[in-house]
Each structure stands twice: as C-alpha cells, then as structure tokens.
Image (cartoon, rainbow, N blue to C red):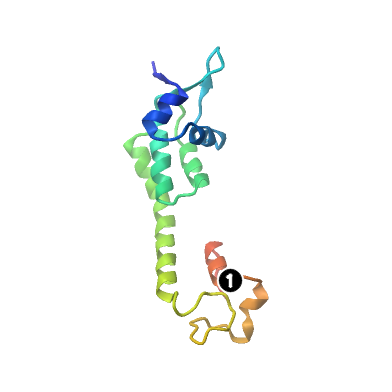
Amino acid sequence: MTRELTVGEVARRSGLAVSALHFYETKGLIQSYRTAGNQRRYASDVLRRVAIIKVAQNLGIPLAAIGDALSCLPDGQTPSRADWEAMSRQWSEELNSRIRQLQKLRDGLSDCIGCGCLSLDKCGLVNWGDKLGAKGPGPQRLIARKQGLRER
C-alpha cells in the first residue's frame, strides 16, 4: 500500500510552499485525493514528481512542457530513472536551441538589438528599406526566432 502524505508533509519534504503544491495541482502537474474529512492526501510518488518539476523548472523548461511529459507517466507510479531519461531527451533539443539563441544574442549584442530601428551607427542587421519595420513593433528578429519562424 502506498503511504499517504499530507500537504504539509509534502511541502516539508519537497522544500516547497503549500501554495506552490496547490498551484502545481491546479495545473495538473500533481494530484491529490480527499479523505472522508475533506483533507488533501498525496501518494508518496508525488515527491519524485515534484523533484522532477523543480529540476525541470530550474533548467528553464516551461510548466506546459513539464505537464506534457508528466502526463505520459502512469498515475500512482513513481517516475523511474528511465522516465527521467525519456523526459530529459525530450527537452534536450529545446534547451540546445535556447543555448544557440542565447549565444547568438550574446555575440551580436553590442552590434544590434534586432529592432529594425536603423538608428545605431554599427548595426549587423541588414534591414534595407526598413523591411522589419513593416512587420510591427519591437525586436522582430528575436520575436520571429522565439516563434520558430524563419526570417525573410
């Protein structure tokens, strides 16, 4: 039989605030059940799930992606090493893409902010005729990169 944990026990053992556990629950990342006295109880596997959530968040993985990965796990089963390896493989390309994006940003930061403003005297942005200005306000190259669109 799986040991039942109160919300306070989960908070203490995971290092999270009770409000964070409630938030994760509303997002569908973890689940509890209610006792006859209407008190929240968690199965002990929730501690591993919370650990996965915390590590993934520290890596910058969005909660939606964490939720997608956790939804593939069987309910009531403690996530295994193989489960973690599958999740981390899934997130690897996203992280690599972000790293490449940040390196490009770092390397070009002093030359151009990607806004299409044409006001910097040294701008690595080729923006003849203010083509980017027609696409809307803000840093259009960064916006396009974040949305996964190719620049034209």
Is residue 112 something one can see in this rendering? yes
Q: Where 140 falls versus 49 (above or below)?
A: below
Q: Residue at x 48, y 31 (%)?
A: 18
Tell which of 99 and 117 is nearer to you. 117
Q: What residue is shown with label 1? A: 140
Q: Residue at x 49, y 78 (%)?
A: 112
Q: Where 111 falls versus 21 (above or below)?
A: below
Tell which of 141 and 8 is nearer to you. 8
User: Circle 1: is it few (<14), some (14-19), or many (20+) Cα within 10 Å?
Assistant: some
List the single residue furthest toward the top. 36
Q: Position of residue 108 (x, y in %)?
A: 43, 76
Q: Position of residue 101 (x, y in %)?
A: 44, 66
Q: Position of residue 84 (x, y in %)?
A: 36, 41
Is residue 78 something one can see in this rendering? no
Left or right of 144: which side holds 96?
A: left
Task: For mark 1, give the secondary structure.
Answer: helix
Left or right of 81: which side holds 140?
A: right
